[in-house]
Image (spheres, rainbow, N blue to C red):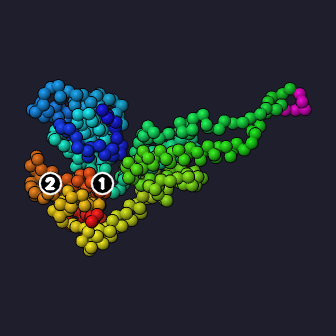
Amino acid sequence: MDSTAHDYPAGLFLDVQEPPCLSLYQPTHRSHPDNQQDRIRFRNLVKTLEDSLRRGYPEEKIQPLIEPFRNLAADREFWNHSLDGLAVLASPGLFLVYRLQRPVPELAVVADSFHTKPLLRILQSADRYQILGLNRKEIKLFEGNRDALDEIEPADEVPRTITEALGEEVTEPHLTASTSGSGAAGPAIYHGQGSRKEDVDLDAERFFRVVDRAVLEHHSRPSGLPLLLAALPEHHHLFRRVSHNPFLLEQGIDVHPDSVPAEELRERAWRAIEPYYLARLAEMTEAFGAAKAKGLGSDDPARVAEAAVAGRVMTLLIDADYEIPGRIESTTGRVEFEDLAHPEIDDLLDDLAEWVMRTGGQVVVVPSARMPTGTGVAAIYRY
């Protein structure tokens, strides 16, 4: 069973899961004393899930589903490092935990599929990015958005230090000893042989190459997020020379993260990211306009739903503040508009997002002020 706390999307929640599917969301708090109530609220939500399960499932099926929730509730270290929100998704053989950098409404629901609306709205937001902080000896990883920045744990396959990356291949100092004075016994004076600086530079280059490959494979590609480099100028030069990460932005931060306060690092990061962010939104808006003019795009939710079910949607833009009550008929893509207050009715835009992501399309949640349409949706078709 996967019980990892994910700081970037794992994608597993979009796969078809064996029911029952348990979805729990709650706002959390970063600091004391506000976070003291978080575990109590979590346990209450777990009780809601358990009560709901008892109405339709035998006890022997309920306990394996609820046990990971109880273990998480008992994990004091986890609750001492909360962010702004929490999402937990569970089904037989699966337990996914997401710490979120934005609050989410409180919810606990058991259904035949996961309730992914709050999670998708955050994970597909256009303002997210990652930071790689490094020097010659170690790395740090961060993930952020316009309003928040937090250090994240690198994947197990990503080396944190040069020793983890190179092991015994790290160059050791080469020293010889001589004595002071005219041949008389005296204190030893050590001299380096060869170019120690060249060896150190070579080690740093090899370390950066290993880090670059690992971060690309286990963070940049899975998340799809732009990557900022935060390092001293000379380390920028060396890392960029060896890097093959297409997500690495030209603009970076010319200090190591340890040398500035956390809020200053976030501000510097957003100053670096914002031009990219605005250019990306402008590019997608222009691409939508061109596609729509050729009949390869639409802002009509009903037409977009039909195209999504058929696997035709390549890129879907969703208004961050828009909701359309309704559901999509899974075989034809026909839309039924309903009342969102009904417990079985979801937001049509979030259902669209799930369809598009399951068929390999790209979903981007866009601020209302940057949306190219007034309908809450803009789709670019593959054909």
Residue at 61% over, 37% down: 169
Main SS of the magenta part reads: loop
Residue at 57% over, 38% down: 166
Give the answer, above or below, for where 91 lies relative to 363.
above
Give the quadrant of the C terminus: bottom left
Viewer-side residue, 104 vs 177: 177
Does residue 62 show up? yes
Residue pointed to by mark 1: 360
**How far across and how far down the image is residue 55, in percent?**
9, 32
Q: Are marks 1 and 2 in contact (CB under 8 Å)?
A: no
Rendering quarter of residue 100: top left
Residue at 41% over, 46% down: 219
Q: Which residues are magenta?
A: 180-184
Horizontal side of 52 relative to 121 (left or right) equals left
How many marks can you see?
Answer: 2
Residue pointed to by mark 2: 331
Give the quadrant of the N terminus: top left
